Amino acid sequence: QVQPVESGGGLVQAGGSLRLSCAASGRTFSSYNMAWFRQTPGKEREFVAAIRWDGFNTYYADSVKGRFTISRDNAKNTVYLQMNSLIPEDTALYYCAADRRNLGGIPRTAVSSYDYWGQGTQVTVSS
């Protein structure tokens, strides 16, 4: 089992940067595809970025492509989300998630595909 814990959120001005971290306990972390999602009040949780278990494939939502970068360090059981050129529309609670079932497969983008979730870290971008 993997328990993700997010950190690194905060308040930033538009155009600024933040780096989110997701530290996950458990010896099986390096086997799982990982992803970041985000959610704002009254809206459904949405896909942001995903990375394959070995780090060789990454996927992004169109809204963040070219501005966000997902990466992982399996030796540290940690996934990162580097967020640059932030805009107010990026304001949300950001969640880290692990896919236990799709071992060796291409990372998926659906919320229902992920089994383990963190509590989230708030990102607020002021205009």
Image (cartoon, rainbow, N blue to C red):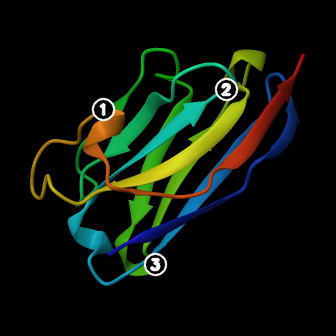
From mark 1 to mark 3, how far is it between C-alphas? 24 Å
**Is label 1 in contact with label 2 (beta carbons under 8 Å)?**
no
Residue sitting at x 38%, y 72%:
2
Going by the numbered disc 1, the residue's amino acid type is Thr
Q: Secondary structure at mark 2?
A: loop
Q: Residues within 10 Å of mark 3 (few under 14, many from 20)?
A: few
Residue 61: percent from left, percent from top = 42, 22
31 on left or right of 9: left
Counting the numbered discs, the total is: 3
Q: Which three-letter amino acid code belongs to the residue tagged 3?
A: Lys
Determine whether 84 is above or below 97 in the image.
Answer: above
Q: Which residue is mark 2?
A: 40
Q: How far across and down, in percent of the image, does residue 104 sit? A: 9, 56
Identify the residue shown where x is 81% and y is 33%: 124
Disc 1 residue crowd, few under 14, some 14–19, many 20+, Cα 10 Å: some
Q: Quadrant of residue 74?
A: bottom left
| Element carrying mark 1 | loop
Q: What secondary structure is found at the residue carrying circle 3?
A: helix
Rendered view: 36 above or below 46:
below
Residue located beneath label 1 in the image: 109
**Outermost residue toward the left?**
104
**Which residue is drawn at the image coordinates 22% and 42% (left, top)?**
107
Residue nearest the viewer, comparing 115 with 68: 115
Upstream in sequence: badge 1 or badge 3? 3
**Residue 93 appears at what percent x and percent y?**
67, 39
93 on left or right of 73: right
Q: Quadrant of residue 13?
A: top right
Instruction: Name the residue carrying label 3.
Output: 76
Horizontal side of 4 relative to 91 (left or right) equals left
Q: Where, quadrant-wise, is the N terminus in this rendering?
A: bottom left
